[in-house]
Each structure stands twice: as structure tokens, then as C-alpha cells.
Amino acid sequence: MSFDPKKMEFSRGELFDFHGVAMVEQFTKNWEKVQNFQARPDDILIATYPKAGTTWVSLILDLLYFGQTSPERQTSIPIHKRVPFLESTLPSNDAGLHLGTDVAENLTTSPRLIKTHYPVQFVPKSFWEQNCKIVYMARNAKDSMVSFFHFDRMMMTQPDPGDWNSYFHRFMEGQMVFGSWYDHVNNWWKKKQTYSNIHYMFYEDMIEDTGREIDKLCSFLCLSLSAEERKQILYGVQFDNMKRNKMANYSTLPIMDFKISPFMRKGKVGDWRNHFTVAQNEEFDEDYKKKMKDPTLELRTEI
Ligand code: A3P
């Protein structure tokens, strides 16, 4: 990927193998600094495979911690600045290259909320050493694939997605930015068995009952909410309200082309049915059984 901040020209990244994971340079070129990032004990890491609802969880956490104390940030600071993307080296129109590590280090809030899409083995060691709380959100593979496809069409720094059928096969082969969905969700799930400070959530549960899932999140974070705060948060994080919210819908980022597809696209469980052919679905299910052997990790493709 290359970027000229004056001309605002972007070129799409190219996948390469990085320590066994398909990546683009945008998320590897700050590797040393990311690996040496000094986490603090009260940092909260939001970890997801792309398109699992990262922004949704990010806004919820930001509202939980700062919604009452600094309500002005909700209308003045875009979510990607409130919850920096650790490994990103995103081009920005104001200050050249934005390093996620710099944005995180410059946060003045406590706790710091930090986002990553890294597979578990890439997470900087200080997060484990400091026993930081981690919120992981998973989304079923079929809807993740569809959402990622539309994202790759509109996000001008992502590799060109090509046609749907080739994308479908590349997803199953793990040839996506941040690698294999299967490895990501499985390895984070395994990590939960040995590291108790992970709260593993599911997008489908959030769609089914957002209030219930926020209550579980609060109990993990040792937070208590008044009925009024809970109501306000539930309202603010509804799909339609987030879609309208310029500070949460990424409309301030010039590298996304909303004419191709909006960031807040559909927000549904089961949109895969509008994309998968019957034959693709059979091929997918057959392959899925071979890759997803752990019966304790169940992801719902409909609710
Ligand atoms: P779709 O493309 O299926 O609509 P991420 O933030 O990890 O990139 O995930 C983006 C996906 O989460 C998009 O999925 C987006 O619409 C969905 N999403 C974001 N906020 C949501 C909300 N409040 N309710 C439901 N889905 C939401």
C-alpha cells in the first residue's frame, strides 16, 4: 500500500505470508513498535476477526466508561480515535500516517480502550503480563465472509476482493487480511481456557438480545449501570442510530467509498443466504466440519 497525503491517493494492499498469517503491509510495518507496546493493567483490548462487530463493541465500551463523564466525546471524536486500532498504519488526511500505537500512547483517558484484529499469537506480550481485560467478539463465518467481501470492495487500502466465487474460496483457504477466520476464532477460544480475563462474545447473541449481552459485559468489567444509562446506551448502539452517527459510522474516513457500500451495511444475521449458492453452501459446510472440530465453540448462522 502506498499513500500520498497531499494527493490523497490510495492503492490496495497485497497479501503476503507474515509468520504464517496472510497480512498486508498496513498492519505489519509497525510490527516492532506494536510488539513492544507497553500495556497498562487497566487497558481493555477489544479483539476480533474483521467484521465481527468491532465498532459496535467499541462504541458500547466507550459509552460504558465515558458516556456519563465526558458526553461531548460522543459528538466530537470519531470512534477510531477514541478506540485506536493498535496495528494500523492508516493513512490520514490530517497528519500523514496514523500509527495506532501513537494514538494509543496519546490517549489521556483511563482505561484506554484499544482495538486489534491480530490473531492471538500476535498480541503484544505486555497485555498478557499486565493481565489486561480482553473482550473478544466472534461472528459466524458465513456472515463474516459476506461482510468482509463488501468491506473489501469499499475500503480502498484492502486487497481487491475480485468476484464473489473466488472470494468465497479464498476465505476458506485463509487468504484474507488477518488470515484464517477458522484459526482466529479457534485460537482465541483456546486462549480463554488458560487466560481467564477474556470475555468471549458472539455477534449473533448481541443481535438476539443486546441488553442481555451488555449486562454480561458489565459483569465481566465489574461495572454497574443505572436503568437510565442502560437505556441510553441501548438506544445509542442500535444499528440505525449508529448508521446515522458520523462519529461511529466511519463517514469521516476518506479511504472508504460509501458509494460502493456503506460501512454500516445491513447489521443482520443470515445475510449470507443472499450470497451463497446452494452448491457453495454445501461445499462450505463440508469444509467447515473439517476445520471446526471443537464442539464447545458453536457459532450460529441464523437466530
Ligand atoms: P454488515 O456488513 O453485515 O452489515 P466491524 O466493526 O468489525 O468492521 O463490523 C462491521 C459489521 O458489524 C457490519 O456488518 C456492520 O453493519 C455491523 N454492525 C456495526 N454496528 C452494528 C449494530 N449496532 N448492530 C448490528 N450490526 C452492527
Image (cartoon, rainbow, N blue to C red):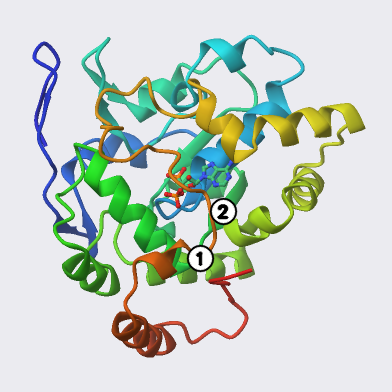
Name the side, left or right, on which 207 lies relative to 255.
Answer: right
On screen, residue 159 above or below 237:
below
* Residue 148 shows in this picture: yes
Name the side, left or right, on which 50 lies relative to 230.
Answer: left
Q: Is mark 2 within 8 Å of ligand 1?
A: no
Q: Amino acid at mark 1?
A: Gly
Q: Amino acid at mark 2?
A: Tyr
- Distance between the alpha carbons at the discs numbered 2 and 1: 21 Å
Residue at position x 30%, y 26% in the image? 99
Name the side, left or right, on which 60 lies relative to 11.
Answer: right
- Per the image, the residue denoted by label 1 is 270
Q: Secondary structure at mark 2?
A: strand
Which quadrant holds the N terminus? top left
* Residue at the outermost front position: 274
Residue at position x 34%, y 83% in the image? 278
Estimate how packed mark 1 is, as few (under 14), some (14 to 19) or many (20 or more) residues with alpha carbons within 10 Å.
some
Q: Position of residue 187 (x, y in %)?
A: 46, 68
- Per the image, the residue denoted by label 2 is 136
Viewer-proximal residue among 238 and 160: 238
* Residue at the outermost right position: 227
Q: Secondary structure at mark 1?
A: loop
* Residue 27 shows in this picture: no
Residue at position x 20%, y 70% in the image? 165
